[in-house]
């Protein structure tokens, strides 16, 4: 399973989103410091879920990081999050 699919599966399980898009943007960062040669390290996530209702930006980001877990987060070099209700 790819890292992109792991991210999507965990987000679907945790947030029951009405919309989720996970884009592996690693190719755009090839050769940059900290970017592994194998890729699967830079991701853009757009997630829409009612779970975020009433939560501020920091709380939403913390919830996503908790859902992904430290093991998966540790394998990701960059994670851009676009989170909304």
Image (cartoon, rainbow, N blue to C red):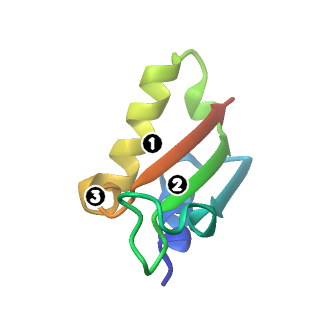
Residue 75 placement (x, y as % from top left): 33, 64
Disc number lying in front (2 or 3) = 3
Q: How many marks?
A: 3
What is the distance, in whole Å, between disc 1 and disc 3 at their CAs?
14 Å
Decide which of tag 2 and tag 1 comes sooner along the chain.
2
Residue under numbered circle 3:
74
Disc number lying in front (1 or 3) = 3
Decide which of tag 2 and tag 3 comes sooner along the chain.
2
Decide which of tag 1 and tag 3 comes sooner along the chain.
1
Neighbor class of circle 1 (other Cα within 10 Å; few <14, some 14-19, many 20+) is some
Residue 82 placement (x, y as % from top left): 64, 36
Point out the residue furthest to the bottom here: 1
Query: What residue is at 57 percent from the left and 28 percent from the top?
Result: 52
Residue 78 placement (x, y as % from top left): 45, 50
Left or right: 71 in relation to 11: left
Neighbor class of circle 3 (other Cα within 10 Å; few <14, some 14-19, many 20+) is few
Residue 54 placement (x, y as % from top left): 57, 15
Query: What residue is at 51 percent from the left and 16 percent from the top?
Result: 56
Query: Is label 2 in contact with label 1 (beta carbons under 8 Å)?
Result: yes
> Which image quarter: residue 63?
top left
What is the distance, in whole Å, between disc 2 and disc 3 at their CAs?
16 Å
Q: Which mark is residue 64?
A: 1
Secondary structure, mark 3, is loop
Q: Which mark is residue 11?
A: 2
Query: What residue is at 65 percent from the left and 44 percent from the top?
Result: 47
């Amino acid at each position: 399973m790819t890292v992109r699919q792991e991210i999507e599966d965990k987000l679907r399980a945790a947030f029951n989103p009405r919309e989720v898009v996970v884009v592996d943007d690693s190719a755009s960062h090839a050769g940059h410091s900290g970017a592994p040669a194998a890729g699967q390290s830079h991701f853009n996530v757009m997630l829409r879920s009612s779970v975020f209702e009433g939560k501020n930006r920091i709380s939403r980001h913390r919830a996503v990081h908790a859902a992904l877990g430290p093991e998966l987060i540790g394998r990701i070099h960059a994670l851009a999050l676009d989170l909304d209700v």
